[in-house]
Amino acid sequence: MSVETIQKFKGFTEVELELIEKAREAGQLAESEISASELNASVSQNFVNKLIDAGITRAILPKEYGGPQISLRGFGEIVRTISYHNISAAWVGYFYPLHNSLPAHLPQEGRDEIVNSGGLIADVFPPIAQVTVVEGGIRLTGTYNYASGVNFVEWIGLGAIAQLPESDRPEFIMGFMRRDEVQVNENWDTFGLRGTGSNQVVATDVFIPRSRIVRLEVANDTRRPPEGSNYDPDYPYYHVPYFSAFYIGFPNMVLGGAKRLIDEFNKRTEARVRIDGDIEKDSPRSQRLLAHLMLEYKKANGLLEQYYDLLESYETDGPYDKGEFAAIRAEIIKICQDIATTVMVSLGGSSLKKNDIIEVTVRDIISVAVHITSLYEDALYTYGRNLYGFEGIGWG
């Protein structure tokens, strides 16, 4: 084992190392199925089963439900490991276990119902629904796009604005319903992240009991479970700003993809011969470019380490501005986007082959960059406002 590998995995528990290795196997399966997932606009049932059988979908369940409750760093490494092989697969491999963290902020009754069902969860956050507060809960109607991995789930969480009886104002919430209570329209046809199967969900006057409603603003502000719930202070999604921790998968995805592109650049330039007969690996051009790509990757990786440090010290040395979290994520993603396009352009026409790992990975990294949580100008605007003492925009 190389010194770099030892340093990379230093500090992970045996359980985390085992899950990371299983993530590698799942990623290799997803890479072998890239052509099919691009055509079908979804990863396969085989891949989802692999995640389930490996225990990855239960990796951050609270310990009270038998999950290993791994650290945020361990979880991030799982995502990065899958994304080295297939970023779309890493996207759903991130969201399935991640969405199991949402019930941790439900009242105990709802948490028990959803977690003990064993089913996977999809969600869509934008609060676009029409909501009526009724006795015992709410009734929700709305059409939501971008429900990633929805074809394989039992539960769907949908964002809304509502004034619950215990609140003095309308607030941001998420209600959970069974998949068979909504209509799913397969309309996912995109430039990148095609394998995520992020289809449309239509809810029509669905009743959601209060026990299945997360008060997202309360979860983000208190960093604790609802009052009256079992409280495990070791749970990784307590004691941290919820949304800043929730978004940890996005920079890990692009870092995994960027590292694969750098490795492919190295391998393909070693085998590349120019039209004038020059061996590309002997060229100062490629030597300098490979060094530049590696330094940019290390820079992005260092920013991610700072991100983890901010999360871990939030309640002891913070609080920190949410804009700082957003800006660090966006900067990592921008660096990796630049690595991706540089590799593609530098390798020439051979990198354009349809469903080649480079072509797919570049498209997927660009697609991560256009996600609402990754928008570069928005993130820097928010951070800049924070630095001048103004309140930022968004959830961090």
Image (cartoon, grey):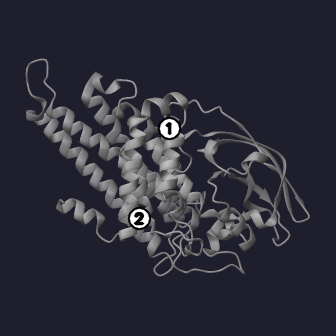
Residue 161 drawn at (x, y percent)? 77, 57
**The disc labelled 1 sits on which kind of residue?**
Leu
Is residue 366 positioned above or below 345 on the image? Answer: below
Considering depth in this image, is 181 or 75 the residue closer to the camera?
Answer: 181
Residue drawn at x 48%, y 62% as measured from the top left: 325
Q: Which residue extends farthest right?
A: 135
Residue 18 drawn at (x, y percent)? 37, 62
Name the element at disc 1: loop
Disc 1 target residue: 193
- Whether residue 389 is visible, yes or no, is yes
Residue drawn at x 65%, y 75% as measured from the top left: 225
* Crowd tier of the residue under label 1, counting other residues whose Cα lies within 10 Å: few below 14, some 14–19, many 20 or above: many
Is 204 on the left-hand or right-hand side of 283?
Answer: right
Q: Which residue extends farthest top?
A: 275
**The disc labelled 2 sits on which kind of residue?**
Gly
Disc 2 target residue: 74
Residue 146 drawn at (x, y percent)? 63, 42
Considering depth in this image, is 289 or 266 the residue closer to the camera?
Answer: 266
Residue 8: give its label. Answer: none
Q: Earlier in the sequence, mark 1 or mark 2?
A: 2
Disc 1 vs disc 2: which is toward the camera? 2
Residue 210 drawn at (x, y percent)? 81, 65
The number of numbered badges drawn on the structure is: 2
Is residue 78 positioned above or below 187 on the image? Answer: below
| Alpha carbon distance from label 1 to label 2 | 23 Å
